[in-house]
């Protein structure tokens, strides 16, 4: 029966209501949108940026590690392969979503000042995540700047922009 067997039973649960709550509150965060569209946007950017990046990384591990281990073609190490380019684009897009969400959160923190809204600001964590995202793009841009003209780099649009900014700067 379990811990809450006397209160909840599987046959007494409203499955449709559970699905609706999953969609409305977990996936779409509709209540947060009704409270503040700005907070909703920043939360969605960070939530979906991280969520999609987790799935991307799982796919990358499968393509780059698991498939070759079973003797299949190693698509990950083929420069310019369309699937690899799609992953590069998606990595940059999700990273940019996270950076934008963190930036919006910091703008919110500054605009909230010392008011009651301040309790919704998690500044140290937001700064850390922003730093991680920005340094990731900096590392990608530095790698691309050192490998100028390498094939298969065109889909990493943020990395290309950073590489263009730092090209010609001494690595030291």
Image (tube, rainbow, N blue to C red):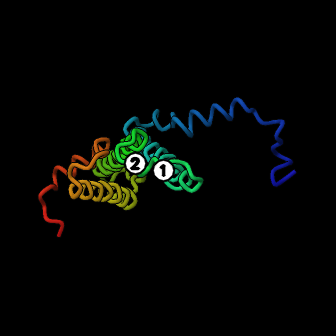
Which quarter of the figure has residue 86? top left
In x, y percent, where is residue 119?
42, 53
Q: Is residue 111 visible?
A: no
- Within-10-Å neighbours for mark 1: few <14, some 14–19, many 20+: some
**Residue identifier under label 2:** 78
- Left or right relative to 147: residue 2: right
Q: Residue at x 46, y 33 (%)?
A: 34
Q: Which quarter of the rendered picture does the C terminus lie within?
A: bottom left
Q: For the residue carrying disc 2, how many other residues have a C-alpha within 10 Å: few (<14), some (14-19), or many (20+)?
A: few
Please give left or right for residue 168 compared with residue 39 in the image: left
**Residue 161 location, x and y as percent?**
21, 46
Q: Quadrant of residue 87?
A: top left
Q: Secondary structure at mark 2?
A: loop
Count of numbered circles on the image: 2
The numbered disc on residue 150 is: none
Front-lying residue, 24 or 110: 24
Residue at 40 percent across and 35 percent down: it is 37
Mark 1–mark 2 CB contact (< 8 Å): yes
Q: Position of residue 111 (x, y in %)?
A: 28, 47
**Can residue 68 be seen from the camera position used here?**
yes
Image-based side of 152 in relation to 149, left or right: right
x and y percentages locating residue 91 in the rendered image: 39, 46
Spatial CA distance of label 1 from label 2 is 7 Å
The residue identified by callout 1 is: 74
């Amino acid at each position: 029966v379990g811990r809450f067997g006397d209160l909840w039973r599987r046959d007494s649960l409203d499955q449709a209501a559970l699905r609706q709550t999953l969609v409305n509150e977990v996936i779409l965060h509709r209540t947060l949108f009704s409270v503040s569209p700005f907070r909703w946007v920043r939360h969605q950017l960070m939530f979906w940026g991280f969520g999609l990046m987790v799935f991307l990384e799982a796919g990358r591990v499968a393509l780059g590690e698991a498939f070759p281990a079973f003797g299949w073609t190693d698509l990950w190490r083929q420069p310019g392969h369309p699937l690899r380019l799609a992953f590069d684009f998606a990595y940059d897009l999700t990273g940019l979503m996270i950076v934008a969400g963190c930036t919006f959160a910091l703008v919110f923190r500054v605009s909230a000042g010392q008011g009651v809204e301040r309790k919704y600001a998690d500044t140290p964590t937001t700064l850390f995540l922003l730093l991680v995202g920005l340094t990731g793009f900096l590392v990608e841009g530095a790698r691309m700047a050192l490998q100028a003209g390498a094939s298969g780099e065109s889909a990493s649009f943020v990395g290309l922009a950073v590489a263009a900014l730092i090209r010609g700067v001494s690595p030291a």
